Image (cartoon, rainbow, N blue to C red):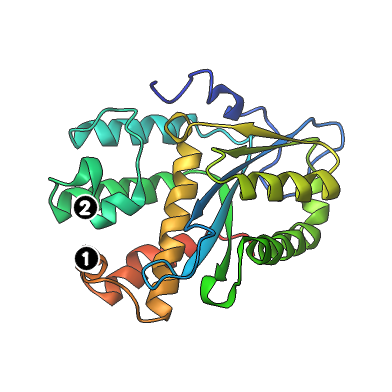
C-alpha cells in the first residue's frame, strides 16, 4: 500500500495537541503508539549472535508524520524502488535479499533516506539488551528483559500516564516477547492495547527495525566484533560514529 493518508497512517495525523513528552491539557484525548522490534533469539549463545535486543519507538499520534512518510516514499521511488518498499536495515548493511545486487552506494542512499525520515518525525526510541553468554535459558532471558523494561516504564510513568490510550504494535515475532509485553503493560499501564502488525504496513515499525539494527552495530563496535561486511558498508569507524550512531542517538528517550 502507499503510505501517507492511507487507513493505517491516518491515525498519525495531527490533531493540534502538544508534542510527545511535553505537558498536555487534561481535556485533550491522546494516544501513544509504541512500535516494537527485536534482534536475535532466545536460543543458546553463539558467537555470531551474542545479544538479544528489544527496541521501542514512541510516537504521539497527535504529531503529524504524513509529509515525512510521503517524502520517504518519493525518495525510495527516485532510487528505483517501489514507493511502499519495506526498508530492512540489516539486509541493507549485509547485502542480503532484495539488496543483494545493489552497490554499497545504492544501499547507503536507502539507509540515509531512513535517517532523514527519522529527523522529520517527532519520535523517540529506547533499546533494551541482554548479552546471551550470561543467560542460561529463555526463562532467565525473559526475566532479565522484564526487569529492564519494567524499570524504564516506572521511571517514565508520569509521562506514559499523560496519554489516554497506549497502543503497542508488534509483529508477534517471538511468543516470549508477546507474553512479556502483555504482562508488563497490563500491570503497569491502565489502558493499553497490543496490535499485531505487518512491518510493511507501518513506516515507524521500519524505524524500530533500523534503531534495533544500529543498536546491534553499536554493541558490536564496543565489543570489537564488527564483521568485514559491516565495516565495508560504513566505510570507516569515524563515518559510522559521526553519520549514523551519533545522529540516531539524538532521538533516544533516556
Residue drawn at (49%, 68%), measured in percent from left and top?
51
Determine which quarter of the picture holds residue 2: top left
Q: Is residue 113 left or right of residue 127?
A: left
What is the crowding at mark 1: few (fewer than 14 residues within 10 Å), some, or many (at least 20)? few
Q: Is residue 23 visible to the viewer in this orientation of the structure?
A: no
Q: Quadrant of the C terminus?
A: bottom right
Q: Position of residue 145 (x, y in %)?
A: 66, 62
**Is label 2 in contact with label 1 (beta carbons under 8 Å)?**
yes
Is disc 2 placed on a helix, strand or loop?
A: loop
Front residue of 178/191: it is 178
- Is residue 63 placed above or below 107 in the rendered structure? above
Residue drawn at (63%, 50%), measured in percent from left and top?
176
Residue 101 image label: none
Is disc 1 placed on a helix, strand or loop?
A: helix
What is the crowding at mark 2: few (fewer than 14 residues within 10 Å), some, or many (at least 20)? some
Q: Is residue 217 left or right of residue 236?
A: right
Q: Is residue 178 left or right of residue 246?
A: right
Q: Position of residue 250 (x, y in %)?
A: 51, 62
Q: Position of residue 123 (x, y in %)?
A: 56, 47
Residue 95 image label: 2
Check disc 1 and report the residue beneath it: 229
Q: Quadrant of the N terminus?
A: top left
Q: Position of residue 49 (x, y in %)?
A: 41, 66
Residue drawn at (45%, 60%), measured in percent from left and top?
248
Residue drawn at (59%, 32%), measured in percent from left and top?
196
Counting the numbered discs, the total is 2
Q: Is residue 197 visible to the viewer in this orientation of the structure?
A: yes
- N-term mark: 2 or 1: 2
- Is residue 70 placed above or below 104 in the rendered structure? above
User: How far, Cα to Cα, is label 2 from label 1?
Assistant: 8 Å
Front residue of 40/100: it is 40
Amino acid at each position: 500500500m502507499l503510505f501517507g493518508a492511507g487507513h493505517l497512517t491516518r491515525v498519525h495525523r495531527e490533531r493540534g495537541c502538544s508534542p510527545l513528552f511535553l505537558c498536555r491539557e487534561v481535556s485533550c484525548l491522546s494516544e501513544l503508539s509504541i512500535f516494537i522490534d527485536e534482534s536475535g533469539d532466545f536460543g543458546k549463545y553463539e558467537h555470531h549472535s551474542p545479544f538479544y535486543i528489544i527496541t521501542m519507538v514512541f510516537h504521539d499520534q497527535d504529531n503529524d508524520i504524513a509529509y515525512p512518510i510521503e517524502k520517504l516514499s518519493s525518495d525510495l521511488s527516485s532510487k528505483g524502488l517501489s514507493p511502499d518498499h519495506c526498508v530492512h536495515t540489516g539486509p541493507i548493511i549485509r547485502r542480503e535479499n532484495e539488496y543483494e545486487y545493489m552497490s554499497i552506494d545504492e544501499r547507503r542512499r536507502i539507509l540515509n533516506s531512513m535517517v532523514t525520515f527519522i529527523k522529520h518525525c517527532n519520535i523517540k526510541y529506547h533499546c533494551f539488551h541482554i548479552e546471551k553468554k550470561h543467560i542460561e535459558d529463555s526463562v532467565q532471558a525473559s526475566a532479565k528483559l522484564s526487569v529492564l523494561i519494567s524499570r524504564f516504564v516506572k521511571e517514565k510513568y508520569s509521562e506514559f500516564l499523560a496519554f489516554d490510550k497506549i497502543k503497542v504494535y508488534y509483529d508477534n515475532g517471538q511468543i516470549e516477547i508477546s507474553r512479556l509485553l502483555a504482562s508488563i503493560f497490563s500491570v503497569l499501564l491502565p489502558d493499553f492495547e497490543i496490535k499485531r502488525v505487518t512491518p510493511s504496513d507501518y513506516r515507524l515499525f521500519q524505524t524500530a527495525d533500523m534503531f534495533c539494527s544500529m543498536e546491534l552495530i553499536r554493541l558490536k563496535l564496543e565489543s570489537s566484533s564488527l564483521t568485514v561486511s559491516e565495516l565495508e558498508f560504513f566505510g570507516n569507524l569515524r563515518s559510522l560514529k559521526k553519520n549514523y550512531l551519533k545522529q540516531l542517538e539524538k532521538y533516544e528517550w533516556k
